[in-house]
Image (cartoon, helix red, strand yellow):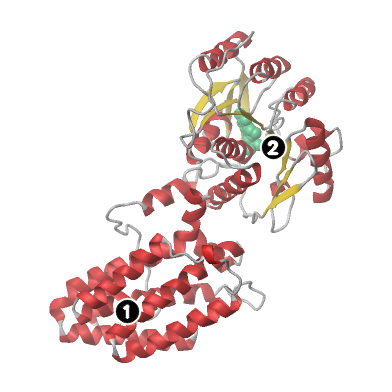
Amino acid sequence: MTYTFIPNSGDNQGAIPRVLTIAGTDPTGGAGIQADIKSITAAGGFPYSVVTSLVAQNTRGVQEIFTPPIDFLRSQLQSVASDVAIDAVKIGMLGSVEIAEAVKEFIQDIPCLVVLDPVMVASSGDRLLQRDAEAAVLDLAHNADVVTPNLPELAVLAGCDVAATIDEALDQAAGLAKTLQAHVLMKGGHFTGDHADNALVSPDGAVHSVPVQRIATTNTHGTGCSLSSALATRLAAGHSPADAVEWASRWLHEAISNADALKIGTSNGPVDHSHTTRRMTRAASTWAPSASAPTQPRLHPAGPYTQKMWDDTAGYLTDILALPFIQQLGAGTLRHDDFIFYLQQDALYLGQYAKALRKLGGQWAIDADGAIAAEREMQDTWLANIPEEQQRMSQVTQGYTDFLLASVYGDAHAVGQAAVLPCYWLYHEVGLRLAEANHPDHPYHDWLATYASEEFESSTRSAIERVEQALAQNPEHLDAAIKACDIASHYEVDFFDQADRAWVVDK
Ligand code: PLP
């Protein structure tokens, strides 16, 4: 059978990548074509889907497989090829020699990127590819741009025993990449230890390593399908293979980190494909009310006014503590470049914050000197060699500091003081919780120690008291003060999340 493809060149530049997945099903939604559709969507693409086999499976394993007649597979492929342009194809479960050959026939002339996940055996131990079809999958792999085998699949394709060490796996991947003249992604999830780094091996043997921190969970059903689909989508969006692997790895890491909270199934459950999207959607809310349950402060309010301020904004601390950035910062697994991004924005922030504090006068102005000292310290210790183009103020930092300056210059004195308070109080509350995870070998030990220090605590207590006194003297400003505190607290959430927004959209 010959297929005539709708041209894809040039007409979709910078637009939504159109990605076709050819795979088997999982009615419980964790793996297979259902995972592919969610992953392609999460990675910013438009998914098309052609089903190879209908798999009766759940989180416990595969119960039954029904494969429609091969002509029906061809018919689906023809329906797609004859009408819609395709920017990338992701191939998953093939099942049999017949299907592998039919898919090869389809993709050999296809004018787009091909990512092959050479699915053979599910992690439940159930076979998803007949043993006699392994050679047909290897044959098909010659038409792929990127191949994403797990360790046993890599061994089959490379004709070796399953690798026992990362170096052995990298050797197998390099051999396979050379044979296929394609990139091979060696997935670190199959080894043990704290790290589950992925490694992209090029046909010339070059290795691009992507750091991935291992998550302690058994809910990883469908991770292979999901990673390869996200990767295909970012490639179709114009990413280099290395950048596409970076993006897909970070996205999947967030999905796995939040898998347990899904509570789906009685055995190895799925990952939360939508976590990043939900986090970003929340960030884009127009009114951004905090729906989260309140968290009790460790530093108590100084009286009824600051009590009311805390009560009305206490959900923001809950939001901050749940952010991937904070979780990883506490665990010491935060990527160095994310930490530097954060510090860079913090340094820019502190310069403006000090101006706001000086305008408020009194003890606030004295604290401004401390803010500038902290900024200098940060510059000297962490930010000494940051290229100038990376020293730009982000939208979040700009918005937050513009708001603070507008408040201290334009609002009543009590309201301006309420606006600057979250940067003490909320920050210290976060610092106290992060400090519990601190230890001498923590990569961010000194930084964590600063924001939980007694010095910061006493200046925070004093700031809370000053706001309490200001409102006690001017109770008519309470509502406006709570509003200012609310806006600033919301910016605090944005501020901590911004490194994790940058990779989703800007990379
Ligand atoms: N089911 C189907 C249809 C698949 O294509 C795949 C992909 O590898 C799986 C199940 C695998 O699931 P698991 O990640 O649990 O091995």
**Which residue lies at the image location 55% right of the left edge and 33% below the top edge?**
36
Three-letter code, disc 1: Ala
Instruction: Estimate the x, y position of residue 108 in percent, counting from the top left.
Output: 68, 19
Task: Choose mark 1 or mark 2, whichever is in front.
Answer: 1
**In the image, residue 22 above or below residue 376:** above
Which residue, as the protein is rendered here, is positioned at the far left?
476
Q: Earlier in the sequence, mark 1 or mark 2?
A: 2
Rate crowding at label 1 as few (under 14), some (14 to 19) or many (20 or more) other CA atoms within 10 Å: many
Quadrant location of residue 437?
bottom right
Three-letter code, disc 2: Thr
**Which residue lies at the image location 62% right of the left edge and 16% below the top edge?**
67
**In the image, residue 206 above or below residue 481:** above
Q: Which mark is residue 148?
A: 2
Instruction: Estimate the x, y position of residue 393 in percent, counting from the top left.
Output: 43, 65
Rate crowding at label 2 as few (under 14), some (14 to 19) or many (20 or more) other CA atoms within 10 Å: many
Instruction: Estimate the x, y position of residue 497 in percent, counting from the top left.
Output: 45, 60
Q: Label 1: which residue?
A: 356
Instruction: Estimate the x, y position of residue 158 in percent, counting from the top left.
Output: 83, 34
Q: Kindly tell me whether residue 97 is visible in this rendering.
A: yes
